[in-house]
Image: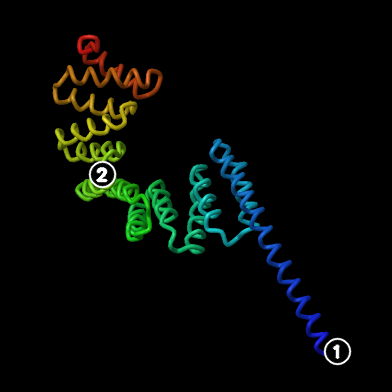
Amino acid sequence: MLKTRVAILFICLTVLCINCTGNKVLVKRKARAAEDLGLSYLQQGNLNVGIKHLIDAARLDPESASIQHKLALAYKDLGEYDKSLVHFKKALSLRPGFPEAQNNLGTLYLMMGEWDLAIGCFEKTLSDVTYKTPYFAYSNLGLAYYNKGEYQRAINSYEQALRLFPSYGLGYFNLALTYEAIQRWEEAINAYEKAISYYPEYPLAHLNVGKLYLNLGRNDKAAKELGFAIELDPKGPYGKEAKELLEKHRLDIRSVR
């Protein structure tokens, strides 16, 4: 009789465990579905609806660092930096070895003007050998140093990013801005030209190098680059500024085409 009761109790406990495991799997699936739906809305630019679904996902799976990271990014894009910060920290508490979240937390600090906190995040990111795109962290580190006015450190960071990703057009653009800040004009021009070679449809690069050529008295090259800026951004602020410069200096882009 005792053996029978023990057997029945064991069967009952086993059934309970199976049901518990099954329920956890079901909840995880619901959380994943809500997360995927939220991400879909975010990709469409519908931030508020996307966040709503991610909040539902986080309620179902409060231990998911991935969901917390996506919420942090969504709030950052929405401009709600305090909420974004809470979710970044939650993601990193759930998964300390999460370099993507660490790097993105650094970009949030950049947007908040917290340069030293940003630098700390990027350095932690770069110390993680599992991080797959370290050139992003080096480039972000360069931005932080640039904003602090530590231009040589910014240059070193951008150059490290470009060693890892030689066709990184934005890296060359930021490097050019830094060279301009310390009046190393020829190096700035070379960096702008590199940026344009990898990202020819970026009007601001054409505008900036055109202005630099103009300041150096190289009017033909200035007119050419300013003309490209107008073509690429005919109704936008870059095209408008380029057109005003051409008119002010009486430059004719037809003579250099």
Residue 140, position as x, y percentages in the image: 33, 48
Residue 97, position as x, y percentages in the image: 43, 62
Gap in Å between the C-alphas at discs 1 and 2? 77 Å
> What amino acid is at disc 1?
Met
> What amino acid is at disc 2?
Leu
- Residue underneath mark 2: 162
Question: Would residue 120 appear left or right of 249 to someone viewing this image?
Answer: right
Q: Indicate the secondary structure of the residue bearing disc 2.
A: helix
Vertical placement of 22 versus 42: above or below?
A: below
Asked which quadrant contains residue 174, the reply is top left
* Classed neighbour count for the residue bearing mark 2: other residues with Cα under 10 Å, few (<14), some (14–19), many (≥20): many
Q: Report the disc number at residue 53.
A: none
Colour scheme employed for the rendering of this structure: rainbow
Residue 76, position as x, y percentages in the image: 49, 46
Vertical placement of 219 versus 68: above or below?
A: above
Asked which quadrant contains residue 204, the reply is top left
* Classed neighbour count for the residue bearing mark 1: other residues with Cα under 10 Å, few (<14), some (14–19), many (≥20): few
Task: Identify which residue, 133 or 63, lies in the foreground.
Answer: 133
Closest to the camera, between mark 1 and mark 2, is 1
Task: Identify which residue, 203 or 195, lies in the foreground.
Answer: 195
Tally of numbered discs: 2
Residue 101, position as x, y percentages in the image: 44, 54
Q: Which of disc 2 and disc 1 is earlier in sequence?
A: 1
Task: Name, please, the residue furthest toward the right.
Answer: 1
Q: Report the disc number at residue 1.
A: 1
Vertical placement of 212 versus 66: above or below?
A: above
- Say which residue appears at 65% left-offset and 52% top-offset: 56
- Say which residue appears at 44% left-offset and 59% top-offset: 98
Q: Indicate the secondary structure of the residue bearing disc 1.
A: loop
Question: Quadrant location of the C terminus?
Answer: top left
Task: Name, please, the residue furthest toward the bottom.
Answer: 2
- Say which residue appears at 40% left-offset and 49% top-offset: 107
